[in-house]
Image: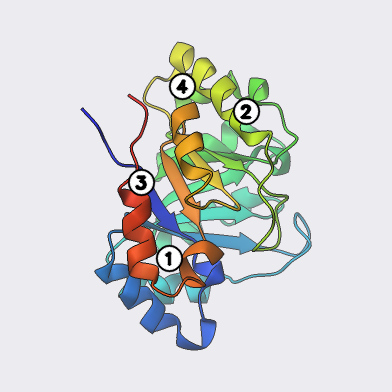
Amino acid sequence: MNTSPIVSPSILAADFANLQTEVEMLNQSEADWVHIDIMDGVFVPNISMGLPVCEAIAKHSKKMLDVHLMIVQPEKYVEAFYQAGAGLISVHYEACTHLHRSIHQIKDLGCKTGVAINPHTSVELLADVLQDIDLVCMMSVNPGFGGQKFIENTYRKVTQLRELAAKHNPNLLIEIDGGVNLANAPLLLEAGANVLVAGSFVFSSPNPLQTISDLKKLTVKA
């Protein structure tokens, strides 16, 4: 049976002066989730938004909040973001001193659990935790800024991760975050991805609703 990918537009690329309007547009769209990048200016060079903005989005959004913590010491903030409305929380492999503990901290809240990896982190490093998580968020640009060029090596990494997941967690969701568009998305899905984060591609398009719909028309590899 053909299935469409999960589409998670990245609110970081939205018009922040009209954030409620943007969230309401996503409510009307075929998007499944809303991707929220939390950046601290330490783990990544940029600063994005914090708990108050996440809470405000949760208040108006009809979609699940896919919260990506691009911060140091994420364990300090996991519970607060869950309380703010996160349905899925991803922490970075590179930011966690005790990754297993951080994963179970999220799971114990009853929240979907993800681990994010930077472009040059090997997927093999996740072998021991794949059975404990719902999703791997694979960065396909260097994290910290929107609108960057897609890193071509991502296709190979997705294939490797899907092969690894077949042994440890066949139901693993593989999310691609960075530079996703209609040219590379079919190749990512063919490689084994099934969740697409799209920021500038959606919010800078002439018709964001149609762009989201076009992504949803794609097919995940069986």
The amino acid marked with disc number 4 is Gln
- Seen in the picture, residue 42 relative to 204 is either above or below; the reply is above
User: Which class describes the residues within 10 Å of circle 3: few (<14), some (14-19), or many (20+)?
Assistant: many
Question: Quick one: SS at disc 4?
Answer: helix
Where residue 93 appears, x then y in whole percent?
Answer: 66, 37
- Seen in the picture, residue 109 relative to 189 is either above or below; the reply is below
Residue that label 1 marks: 84
Q: Visible in this render: residue 4? A: yes
Among numbered discs 1 and 2, the one appearing first in the sequence: 1
Residue 169: assigned label: none
User: Which class describes the residues within 10 Å of circle 1: few (<14), some (14-19), or many (20+)?
Assistant: some
Q: Quadrant of residue 66?
A: bottom left
Residue that label 3 marks: 6
Residue that label 4 marks: 131
User: Which class describes the residues within 10 Å of circle 4: few (<14), some (14-19), or many (20+)?
Assistant: some
Rounded to the nearest angstrom, the CA distance separating label 3 from label 1 is: 22 Å
The amino acid marked with disc number 3 is Ile
Rounded to the nearest angstrom, the CA distance separating label 3 from label 2 is: 19 Å
Q: Quadrant of residue 173?
A: top left
Residue 157: assigned label: 2
Q: Quadrant for the N terminus, please.
A: top left
Q: Is residue 61 left or right of residue 174?
A: left
Q: Quadrant for the C terminus, please.
A: top left
Rounded to the nearest angstrom, the CA distance separating label 3 from label 4 is: 21 Å
* In-front residue for pair 190/99: 190
Rounded to the nearest angstrom, the CA distance separating label 4 from label 1 is: 27 Å
